[in-house]
Image (cartoon, helix red, strand yellow):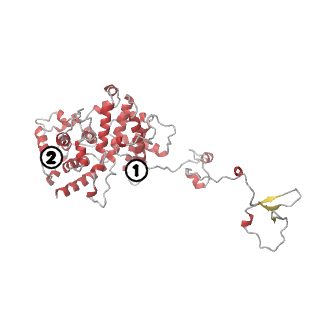
Amino acid sequence: MFHYCDASSSTASTAKPGPSIADFTNTFVLSATANSKQILCEVPKGLSIDPSRQRRTHRKSRAGCDNCRRRSVKCNEEFPCANCTRRGDYCRRPVQYNTVDAPSILPSMSAQNLLPSSSASTGTVVNLLHLKLFHHFQTSTHQTLLFTPDVWAHASQLSFSFSFLMDAILCVAARHLAFLHPEDPTYPAAAAGHLGRALCGFRVELSNELTSTHLDVFIVTSVLLQFEMWTNIDFFSPRNNDVASFDPSRDRIFAFSSSLKQVFLRSFPVSSIQSSVFMPHIRNSPLDNLVGTAQISSGTLANFQDFFAYDHPLTLDLLNVPLPYTRGIDWVNLDAWKNHVHDTQDTPDLIKDGYMPVITRLCLILSFLSEASPPDSLSSKSPLLVGLARYMHSFPAMCNASFVSMCHSPFASMVHQSDPHALLLLYHFYRAVRILLPPNEYWWAHKRATVLETVLKEWLIAECT
């Protein structure tokens, strides 16, 4: 039987109320000899206690696995954790992403607080979602990205040495899964995070000495980031379908393409281009095949340029495609469709060097619409459709200045300033993309084309009335 004793007296013989549970918070069991009875003695409140002997507060696990959380036991936060290994359970932990506000265009990024690039860091955390994204890219996404499988196979190998390229791959794969599963918020968040890391690492890599290997990495990363720019229409968030909220200056696809084009033309010598694995695929332009199939006459191109002439007033009739197309007679020379690069400091003419070349490129694209009666129909498996998709994908880059020294093209400046004639050409371009490219095979273009066709048409109608 236990007796309660105060520290200053071994007997307690007063008629006091029975002790409460709070009275035992500073007591311990004491036994002086083997024959003595056990008694409870109170620890003196003034007793100094060695801090090193105090029990440490339990640190709650913030990254424990699901099994340990469910069983309310401490997880050592390894993968797999010790508890799951001992019990033979599958160790699963929740995936957490920090959404990164990605910079709009590459040259505007600060060089501070950038993530490591070049060689892949051994400390990089890889989780199950990363593996899922990479597997999806390998088995599905790369088949929708225009280039041949051997190109993306080589790109995948390079990504193990350049972490920013791996992030670009995972970003595009996440965008593809977001298109396939729009109800799942995991994939947009993952895409945003990988985009931020890819841009930061890419910026650091471009500040280093560039070699032939870096050229291939630059090309494939640039192409992937352009696909990302196509999928991104976050710049347009209409309020109650208010078209007046549309601000084309927030769309960075033209400025971004211009930045990449300048870096390429300025940074890589001819010798490195000759040794590149990817350059033969880039040089294999679809233009020859498109021009040969379209067979557009010089008279048709002249009528097309007159129809969209900048000095004509903006009317609703301009929302229609200028018809008919005359084909097979007096073909337009192939050189007229090509984009020429000039290394000069001269200020280009806004209309001649910016607006008119876009009309020419648009004439070729619109010639494949059904109302233009193209000579060959486009099927989803047609090589001609793949070439047309490549031509459309490069449209923002081709609309940029042919002048190396320029930061922004005249046409991009016109778009950013909401020039009605420039936005009219963009309307026809996105309408053609929406009609000609099947949404599943060319998922990266579908949402942008659908949204901007509608918005631009409503904006132009409001401008004309």
Q: Which quadrant of the figure has residue 227?
A: top left
- Pick the residue in front: 270 or 15: 15
Quarter of the image with the N terminus in it: bottom right
- The residue lying at 30 percent from left, 36 percent from top is 262
Quarter of the image with the C terminus in it: bottom left
Q: Residue furthest bottom?
A: 15
> Is residue 425 positioned above or below 31 on the image?
above
**Helix, strand, or loop for circle 1?**
helix
The mark total stands at: 2
Tell me where residue 150 appears, x and y as whole percent.
36, 33
Dot 1, crowdedness within 10 Å: few (<14), some or many (≥20)? some
Tell me where residue 462 appears, x and y as whole percent.
20, 58
Dot 2, crowdedness within 10 Å: few (<14), some or many (≥20)? some
Which of discs 2 and 1 lies nearer the camera? The answer is 2
Left or right: 449 in relation to 187: left
Q: Amino acid at mark 1?
A: Pro
Q: Amino acid at mark 2?
A: Tyr
Where does label 1 land, which residue?
188
Tell me where residue 379 appears, x and y as whole percent.
25, 43
Q: Which quadrant of the figure has residue 342?
A: top left
Query: Is residue 149 something one can see in this rendering?
Result: no
- The residue lying at 38 percent from left, 53 percent from top is 182
First-in-chain label (2 vs 1): 1
Tell me whether the residue at label 2 lies in contact with that at label 1, contact meaning CB atoms closer than 8 angstroms: no
Q: Give how far apart the Cα atoms at labels 2 and 1 are.
A: 40 Å
Left or right: 437 in relation to 155: left
Where does label 2 land, which residue?
310
Tell me where residue 166 appears, x and y as whole percent.
42, 39
Query: Is residue 49 something one can see in this rendering?
Result: yes
**Helix, strand, or loop for circle 2?**
loop
Q: Which mark is residue 287?
A: none
Q: Residue furthest top?
A: 271
